[in-house]
Image (spheres, helix red, strand yellow):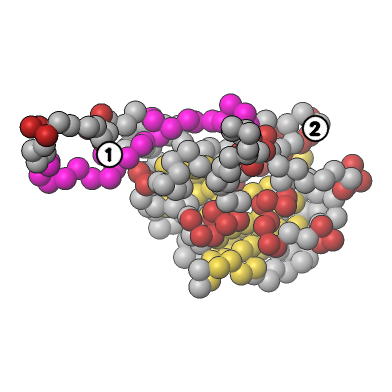
């Protein structure tokens, strides 16, 4: 919780004396909310986009992030100097400390694997960690693809399976709760709405690489931050491969068996 020394209060004239400041002043890392102060999950969040749709979809959202983390090997960093996570609250705006996104998977480099070197993370708080993710991956689902792709979304370019193509993209429960303003004294009060995923990754976090994958079409897309804006990178449609030169790693589509499940 925020320390009481950060609160303001009224004083009488005879007590209006300068208040001694700490010397040196405490750093923002000490005075701003940490992962211990912020919710680790949204109670109104319905869960993973495909949970409840079919057993195979549950398995995909469970196993795919695991496969990314287990096959990741960074030559320029020790295992204690980078962090990967899936479906973890990522807080990005100190002016709106409860605003967050939950990437399907992300990688942050140059940060300790454990929070402060000793604790498992409940969430990833940008103003505490000091570094945004280097790579964010989202797995497209019928109900989330419009937000995941933002201005790059085009229903004509995404050919889903017959069942999925009939479903319209709908906002999550948490987004609906934010976008629907509460009623006041006879009039609606406007509540500021958090930005969409693409804008957060592009403008707030400035994630260098944003990757999306549709298992329905087996299409992999890469958006690279260039001049402050994402530019989609051209990939070989027959054998798509994303090579991250700075990290000396590549990402491609793989066929095989993982945890007893065969990916065709």
* SS assignment at label 1: helix
Main SS category, magenta section: loop
Residue at the disc numbered 1 = 31
For residue 188, side relative to residue 13 (left or right): right
Depicted 50 relative to depicted 110: above or below: above
Circle 1/circle 2 CB separation < 8 Å: no
Residue 128 can be seen, yes or no: yes
Q: Is residue 124 visible?
A: no
- Quarter of the view holding residue 116: top left
- Residue located 11% across and 34% down the image: 13
- Please tell me whether residue 22 belongs to the stretch shown in magenta: yes
First to last magenta residue range = 20-45
Residue 17 position within the rendered picture, expressed as x and y whole percent measured from the top left: 8, 38
Label 1: how many residues lie within 10 Å, few (<14), some (14-19) or many (20+)?
few
**Disc 2: CA contacts within 10 A as few (<14), some (14-19) or many (>=20):** few
**Label 2 sits on residue:** 53
- Is 196 or 131 nearer to us in this picture? 196
């Amino acid at each position: 919780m925020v320390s009481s020394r950060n609160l303001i209060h009224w004083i009488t004239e005879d007590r209006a004396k300068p208040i001694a400041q700490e010397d040196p002043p405490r750093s923002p890392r000490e005075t701003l909310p940490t992962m211990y102060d912020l919710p680790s999950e949204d109670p109104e969040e319905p869960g993973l986009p495909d949970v409840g749709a079919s057993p195979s979809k549950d398995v995909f959202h469970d196993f795919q992030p695991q496969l990314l983390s287990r096959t990741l090997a960074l030559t320029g960093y020790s295992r204690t100097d980078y962090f990967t996570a899936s479906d973890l609250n990522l807080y990005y705006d100190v002016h709106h400390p409860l605003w967050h996104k939950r990437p399907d998977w992300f990688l942050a480099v140059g940060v300790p694997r454990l929070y402060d070197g000793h604790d498992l993370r409940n969430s990833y708080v940008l103003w505490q960690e000091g570094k945004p993710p280097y790579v964010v991956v989202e797995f497209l689902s019928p109900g989330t693809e419009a937000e995941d792709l933002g201005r790059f979304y085009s229903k004509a370019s995404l050919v889903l399976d017959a069942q999925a193509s009939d479903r319209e993209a709908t906002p999550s429960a948490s987004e609906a709760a934010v976008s629907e303003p509460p009623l006041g004294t006879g009039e609606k009060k406007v509540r500021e709405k958090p930005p969409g995923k693409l804008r957060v990754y592009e403008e707030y976090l400035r994630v260098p690489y944003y990757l999306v994958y549709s298992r329905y079409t087996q299409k992999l897309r890469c958006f690279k931050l260039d001049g402050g804006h994402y530019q989609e990178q051209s990939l070989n449609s027959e054998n798509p491969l994303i090579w991250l030169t700075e990290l000396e790693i590549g990402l491609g589509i793989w066929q095989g068996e993982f945890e007893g499940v065969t990916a065709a």
